C-alpha cells in the first residue's frame, strides 16, 4: 500500500482537485494547509536553493507532495507547484493528515518512503 492509497481511502468527492496543464497549484511562501496525491498527470515543483540556484522536481502519478507545509511551524510552501499536464489530485487537510498518522501509522511510513524515493531521484538526476 502507498500513501496515495491511504489518501484515497480517506477522501471524499469534494477533495479532488483538477488542474489544466500550466496551472499553478501553490506558490513559494504561501501558507499551506493541505497536501496532495497525484491520481492523474504530473506536477513540477520548483524552488530556489540556498545558493540562489533554481531547482525543480517532476512529481509523477502515484506520488504525494506538499506535506512539509503541514508539519513545519510556519506552514509555508517551500516551492511552487505547476501542473505539467492536465491533473487530478487528491487533497488532504492537516486535520485528515493528523488523523491518518494517528489511526494508520503505516501512512507515515509510506509517506516517508515516497519522499525518500523522490529525494533519491533528484540526487540521481543531479549527479
Image (cartoon, helix red, strand yellow):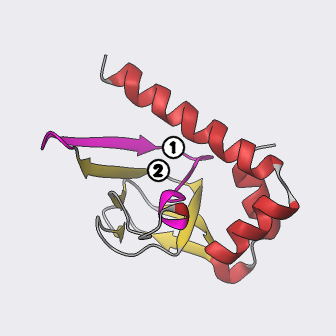
Q: Which label sits on residue 60?
A: 1
Residue at the limit of the structure toward the top, as seen here: 127
The residue at the point 45 percent across, 72 percent down is 32
Q: How many marks?
A: 2
* Rendered-image quadrant of the N terminus: top right
**Of 74 and 108, which appears nearest the observer?**
74
Q: Position of residue 10 (x, y in %)?
A: 79, 69
Residue 103 left/right relative to 54: right
Within-10-Å neighbours for mark 2: few <14, some 14–19, many 20+: many
Q: Position of residue 65 (x, y in %)?
A: 52, 54
**Residue at image mark 2:** 42
Q: Is residue 51 magenta?
A: yes
Residue at the limit of the structure toward the front, as seen here: 73
The residue at the point 33 percent across, 74 percent down is 30
- Vertical relation: 88 (above or below) 127: below
The residue at the point 38 percent across, 68 percent down is 76
Q: Quadrant of residue 27?
A: bottom left
| Secondary structure of the residue carrying numbered label 2 | loop
Q: Which residues are magenta?
A: 50-70
**Of 17 and 28, which appears nearest the observer?**
28
| Secondary structure of the residue carrying numbered label 1 | loop
Confirm or deny contact between disc 1 and disc 2 (CB under 8 A).
yes
Residue at the limit of the structure toward the right, as seen here: 103
Within-10-Å neighbours for mark 1: few <14, some 14–19, many 20+: some
The residue at the point 29 percent across, 50 percent down is 46
Q: Which label sits on residue 105?
A: none
Amino acid at each position: 500500500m502507498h500513501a496515495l492509497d491511504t489518501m484515497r481511502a480517506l477522501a471524499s468527492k469534494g477533495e479532488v482537485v483538477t488542474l489544466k496543464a500550466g496551472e499553478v497549484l501553490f506558490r513559494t511562501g504561501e501558507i499551506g494547509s493541505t497536501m496532495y496525491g497525484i491520481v492523474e498527470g504530473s506536477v513540477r515543483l520548483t524552488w530556489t536553493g540556498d545558493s540562489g540556484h533554481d531547482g525543480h522536481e517532476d512529481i509523477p502519478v502515484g506520488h504525494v507532495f506538499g506535506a512539509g507545509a503541514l508539519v513545519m511551524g510556519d506552514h509555508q510552501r517551500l516551492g511552487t507547484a505547476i501542473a505539467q499536464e492536465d491533473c487530478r489530485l487528491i487533497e488532504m487537510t492537516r486535520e485528515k493528515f493528523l488523523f491518518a498518522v494517528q489511526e494508520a501509522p503505516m501512512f507515515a511510513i509510506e509517506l516517508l518512503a515516497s519522499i525518500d524515493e523522490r529525494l533519491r531521484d533528484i540526487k540521481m538526476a543531479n549527479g
